Amino acid sequence: MVVDLKTVMSWNPCEDFPESRIADIFEGRESCDLEDVFAEPMRQDEWLWVALREAFFSQHDLETLAAHFCLHVGMLANHEDSTVTNAVLNAILACSGSFDMLPEDKRHDRWASGATDAEKSVALSALWAATARANTEDDKEKRLEQWNLERDWQVNHVKKKAGIDAD
């Protein structure tokens, strides 16, 4: 599946991605696909922000990805830590489409407009899964390493789901 510049702009990207920067990603093409997106030098969360859309995956596929994110981190998490437990529970709530049950200040919703419920659910599941994995470590440097490991796993999982060779 492919998207055009107008579609991406309708998702209300953050100020780090003005229309001119997104147009550069398109490199003069009328549309781009996920392989083009993953070829761009962006952070993991930026790749996921673009990729976790119904333009690329069905609602069912997004819900499946969200469930995989929850299960993956659930197997890694230290459930003795209430922060981790809460993050996993939040990911499961998001995965079920019940993210609106969470307090407003817990949503950190970069997807306030321009996203379907399935897109919001999988994005929040991915965020909380990465947060939960990071919170399994006390040391700040190790937390960042755990966060990046989870994000790497998520990006590779999305690539595989899209039929793109994962790293």
Image: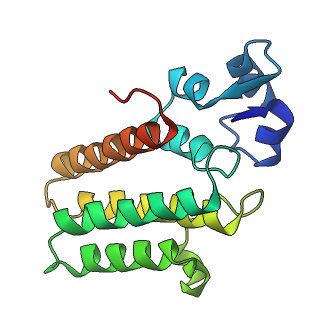
- Residue 71 location (% of width, % of height): 30, 66
Q: Quadrant of residue 16?
A: top right
Residue name at image x 22 percent, y 44 percent? 145
Residue in view at x 69 percent, y 34 percent: 17
Residue 75 percent location from the top left of the image: 19, 66
Vertical relation: 48 (above or below) 93: above
Q: Is residue 72 visible?
A: yes
Above or below 59: residue 85: below
With 121 as the anchor, is 164 left or right in this view? left
Q: Quadrant of the C terminus?
A: top left
Residue 41 in sight = no
The residue lying furthest to the top in this view is: 28
In front of the other: 52 or 106: 52
Q: Looking at the image, what colour scheme do you see?
A: rainbow
* 155 sits to left or right of 100: left
User: Quick check: 166 above or below 101?
Assistant: above
Q: Quadrant of residue 148?
A: top left
Q: Tell me what residue is drawn at x 68 percent, y 52 percent.
A: 54
Q: What is the number of callouts on the image?
A: 0
Q: Residue 68 vs residue 66: left or right?
A: left
Please determine whether, in this image, residue 3 is positioned above or below residue 12: above
Depth check: give the residue in front, 111 or 54.
54
Residue at screen point 62% across, 65% down:
118
Q: Quadrant of the N terminus?
A: top right
> Horizontal and vertical percent for residue 113?
77, 61
Question: Image check: 100 left or right of 159?
Answer: right
